[in-house]
Image (spheres, rainbow, N blue to C red):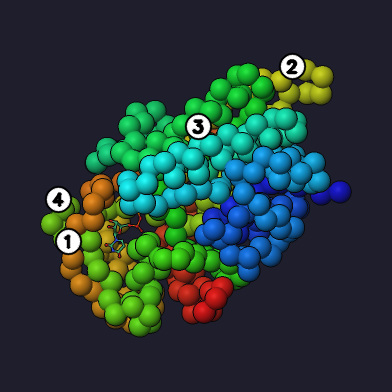
Amino acid sequence: MADRILVTGGAGYIGSHACKALAAAGYVPVTFDNLSTGWRAAVKFGPFEQGDLMDRARLDQVFAEHRPVAVMHFAALSQVGEAMREPGKYWRGNVCASLNLIEAAVDAGCLDFVFSSTCATYGDHDGVVLDENTPQTPLNSYGASKRAIEDMLRDFGAAHGLRSVIFRYFNVAGADPDAEVGEAHQPETHLIPLILDAVDGRRPALTINGTDYPTADGTCIRDFVHVMDLVDAHLLGLEWLRANRAPDGAPRTGGAEVFCLGTGSGFSVREVIDHAKRATNRPVPVIEGPRRDGDAVSLVSGSRRAGMELGWRADRSTLPQMIGDAWRWHQSGGYDR
Ligand code: UDP
């Protein structure tokens, strides 16, 4: 029988792509999601268990029923603006919820754990290409809550033999090239889907958040990773955990290993818009607006360790491919349009 993987947030953007990749690799992805931001229609590749991570009894039930061999933990609150306004929501919804999940996994003997963290745990290091050793100085409760979960995984590793792979990354883009799943946030706040909304008239224009930054064209710089490359890394992390297990009967050593996932180079907002014009062959109406609170000038991450130890490559993370795949998904109508 195929091994089951519990995928929290499996109805969300990255989680749904991970489920597709897991199913293609021969696993059964069991989605655990409260549908607060996810889509029931995105759960296509394995069983669905609706539930909330705050509900420990429900988690225990799902672990007992499916006996997953590992957890992939994507479910999270992830809006920086909201985190600034409502820190309690983030500490409870990310940290307390993850504590429940981690305790339930340990109690169920499910000790391999892949965690989707974020480069927002670093805070502002403008101009530096981030790596695993860059100091973590998060600027908001979103980054701080994710960093706390990383610490929690280390503690549970030392005490209970939990083995974790922690991925830190920034801007995820693109969609499943078959357009079976894609990016759909409600409300949408991310650059590429908003550009595509402006291209096809769902919005009147894309507002550029600030044109007076100290960059070549005055707009912010970001490092974009294709969602399919990102889920490849999660699968490689899972295989790495399973390949490095202690032999049966040997004492189990827990721990948490961090891998940054970036391309090492960034693109400005204006460069992304130019690529979108070419990829869609249509104009992008833009409005030049003021800076957005909390935006760093330039966020770029390397991935040397992931390349060397996991064999990860960000081959699909080119703007033409990411925008092209996002555009195909966008034109397919998404989940509810
Ligand atoms: N951005 C923009 N207009 C928008 C949405 C985003 O100019 O309507 C900019 C945003 O200020 C940032 C970059 O695009 O500089 C990427 O933003 P996004 O919200 O996609 O991701 P973030 O980098 O905040 O995680």
Left or right side of 56 for 324: left
State the residue lying farthest toward the top. 251
The tag earlier along the polypeptide, 3 or 2, is 3
* Circles 1 and 4 in contact, beta carbons < 8 Å: no
Secondary element under disc 4, as helix, strand or loop, is loop
Q: Is mark 4 within 8 Å of ligand 1?
A: no
Measured Cα–Cα span from mark 1 to mark 4: 14 Å
Residue located 58% across and 65% down the image: 39
> What amino acid is at disc 1?
Pro
Percent across and percent down for residue 208 are 23, 65
Residue located 38% across and 42% down the image: 87
Q: Residue 119, relative to residue 45: is it above or below?
A: above
> What amino acid is at disc 4?
Pro
Q: Is mark 1 within 8 Å of ligand 1?
A: no
Identify the mark at residue 251; answer none if there is no mark: 2
Measured Cα–Cα span from mark 4 to mark 3: 33 Å
